[in-house]
Image: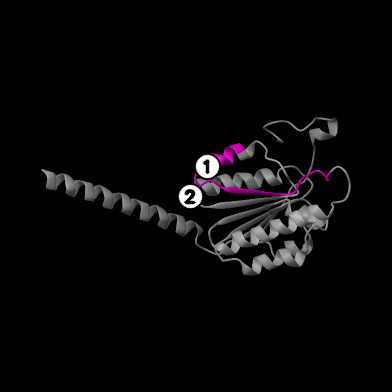
């Protein structure tokens, strides 16, 4: 009887390993190709929202996700959802946000952005993440916080299976030239124009 129970446990374990291997194989079939460069830009709303949706989808598939927020310094509601995912996405902030409404960025903001780009480069070349999202990095380029040559360098250094997503309005032509996918959000109508403030659960 004991021998039969032992054999049954071994059979269940073997089946579980087989199913796990099959699941990993299916994931690899879907994802083990050359990672793409995606750019979400334009004046319309929805760029960061789209990137966070992709992060949730990737985590749901079992992929590890790294998110770097440039020019932002605080968490909003989507981060509560991201924190519940397994594997849990890594989320970093590289900006204070304080100067966005008060003029030009100072040296401290530039240093935060440079630190963010270096952290993103390490995440990409580590091979530990399948999806890397650089939120608002296009704006960081537009404001002169980062050099386009430094951003393009991370494309050359990345492992081929890493997907990179860059968001923010004003994506420069040289960046777009390296993109496999470009989505431009176009504002047709926006309730902000009517004085509607940012709302919890929608914009925050």
Residue 86 lies within the magenta run: yes
Q: Is residue 177 visible?
A: no
Q: Nearer the viewer, residue 124 or 195?
A: 124
User: Mark 1: which secondary structure?
Assistant: loop
Q: Quadrant of residue 204?
A: top right
70 displayed left or right of 104:
left
Residue 148 to residue 167: above or below: below
Residue sitting at x 84%, y 30%: 195
- The residue indicated by pointer 1 is 85
Which residue lies most toward the left here? 1
Residue 35 to residue 49: above or below: below
Q: Nearer the viewer, residue 132 or 174?
A: 132
Upstream in the sequence, badge 1 or badge 2? 2
Q: Give coordinates of residue 99: x percent, y percent.
A: 83, 45
Quadrant occupied by the N terminus: top left
Instruction: Give the magenta range.
Output: 80-100
168 displayed left or right of 68:
right
Q: Give coordinates of residue 45: x percent, y percent.
A: 74, 42
191 displayed left or right of 121:
right
Q: Quadrant of residue 164?
A: bottom right
Q: Residues within 10 Å of mark 2 (few under 14, many from 20)?
A: some
Q: Residues within 10 Å of mark 1 (few under 14, many from 20)?
A: some
- The residue indicated by pointer 2 is 62
Q: Give coordinates of residue 131: x percent, y percent.
A: 58, 55
């Amino acid at each position: 009887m004991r021998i039969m129970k032992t054999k049954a446990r071994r059979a269940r374990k073997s089946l579980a390993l087989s199913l796990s291997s099959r699941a990993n194989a299916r994931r690899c079939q879907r994802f083990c190709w050359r990672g793409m460069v995606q750019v979400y830009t334009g004046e319309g709303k929805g760029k960061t929202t789209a990137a966070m949706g992709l992060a949730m989808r990737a985590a749901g598939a079992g992929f590890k996700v790294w998110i770097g927020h440039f020019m932002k310094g605080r968490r909003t509601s989507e981060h509560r959802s991201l924190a519940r995912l397994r594997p849990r996405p890594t989320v970093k902030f590289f900006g204070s946000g304080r100067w966005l409404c008060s003029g030009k960025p100072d040296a401290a903001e530039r240093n935060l952005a440079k630190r963010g780009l270096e952290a993103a480069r390490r995440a990409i070349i580590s091979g530990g993440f399948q999806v890397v999202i650089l939120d608002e990095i296009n704006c960081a380029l537009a404001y002169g916080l980062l050099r386009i040559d430094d951003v393009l360098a991370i494309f050359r250094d990345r492992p081929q299976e890493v997907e990179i997503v860059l968001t923010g309005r004003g994506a420069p032509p040289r960046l777009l030239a390296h993109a496999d996918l470009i989505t431009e959000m176009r504002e047709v109508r926006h309730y902000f124009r009517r004085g509607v403030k940012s709302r919890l659960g929608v914009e925050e």
